[in-house]
Amino acid sequence: MIRFNIPFLRYRRFAYIISALIIAGGLISFSLHGLNLGIDFTGGTILHLRLPEQYNMQEVREVLSPHELEGVPLQRAGGDMTEEGSEVVVKAPYLEESTRQEVIGAFQERWPDITTEDVLRVENVGAVIGEELTREAFLALLLAIAGMVLYITLRFQFRFSLAAIAALLHDVLIVLAIFSIFQIEINSPFIAAILTVFGYSINDTIVIFDRIRENLRFRQKRTLVQLVNDSINENIVRSINTSLTTLIVLISLFIAFHYFVGGMDLQAFALALLAGVVSGTYSSIFIAGPLWVSMNQRRKEGEISPA
């Protein structure tokens, strides 16, 4: 078995600075621009058209471009989820009746065989995710965090739970910062991605904390820094292998959503998971363990126990 001796904790201040810069950039962007909320949060107009011939998403975006709608979410419908299909759903911001007719006219100009029967759905819709649902989701996350704190405190120590929750919030803030800085549109799948990041991040952190706890039983003359560094090195292969296999799947999903399925909300879902997995692996190595060390360095040696 390969054993590493990488001095991860030597770079903890550098890691803190990188995380602080990204999160600060996200907070500045959020204060200036906010998040780019999609139709699921704000409501808008749905156009569902049946095209008379096979098409690709680039053709649809070229039709929408003169109306400043080239970046709106598109979804295939009515056919197999391949590069080509027969129906398309356009999810746009609220459009006036005149603008809707202009967009439909642009499709008819590109595909002259489109008739009124091929316009399957044209309607304004309200927000799928309202204020009440957002509030309930936020409350559910707070309850989940409270449950994690209780579980980690009972199984480990209270300081372990504080470090784990700090790393978890770090990962969520990193994902939100990326989406705010690059103004990537957020729809309902993004909520599922954030919840998935919660689970993935806390799992990776708990594995390393479990190794730290085991090594505390056989600490001998090692300092806390040495002990935590050894614990991270003992788990580094597992962490990297788990992350790489997950990233391979997520990259494949992102490519499929981008080039074949065509849904921009699903692309954002895959991108949020990608950012969350990378951040979760990074925080479990460079944030969670080092934070626990910082919390314990001022305590007396006899006060630090494995349970």
Image (cartoon, helix red, strand yellow):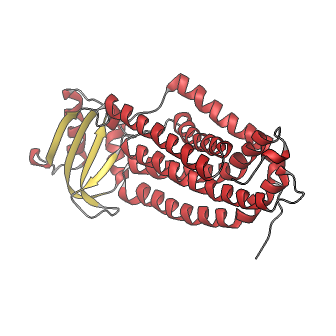
User: Would you place residue 5 above or below residue 201 in this image?
Assistant: below
* Whether residue 181 is situated above or below residue 120 in the rendered picture: above
Whether residue 9 is situated above or below residue 70 in the rendered picture: below
Q: Residue furthest left?
A: 117
Front in this rendered view, residue 151 or 180: 151
Question: With 290 as the anchor, is 48 left or right in this view?
Answer: left
Residue 160 vs residue 48: left or right? right
Front-most of residues 244 and 49: 244
- Residue placed at 50% from the left, 64% from the top? 249
- Asked where in the image residue 40 lies, by quadrant, the reply is top left
Residues 283 and 95: in front is: 283
Q: Residue furthest top?
A: 32
Query: Where residue 256 sits: x, y (%)?
Result: 43, 60
Give the residue furthest to the front: 302
**Can you tell which quarter of the image residue 108 is in?**
top left
Q: Position of residue 297 (x, y in %)?
A: 82, 41
Q: Residue 289 at x, y = what percent? A: 72, 49
**Quadrant of the drawing holding the N terminus:** bottom right
Q: Residue at x 22, y 41 (%)?
A: 47
Q: Is residue 239 above or below residue 194?
A: below
Q: Nearer the viewer, residue 268 or 305?
A: 305
**Which residue lies at the image location 54% right of the left edge and 27% below the top edge?**
30
User: Which residue is at 40% across, 51% downward?
Assistant: 266
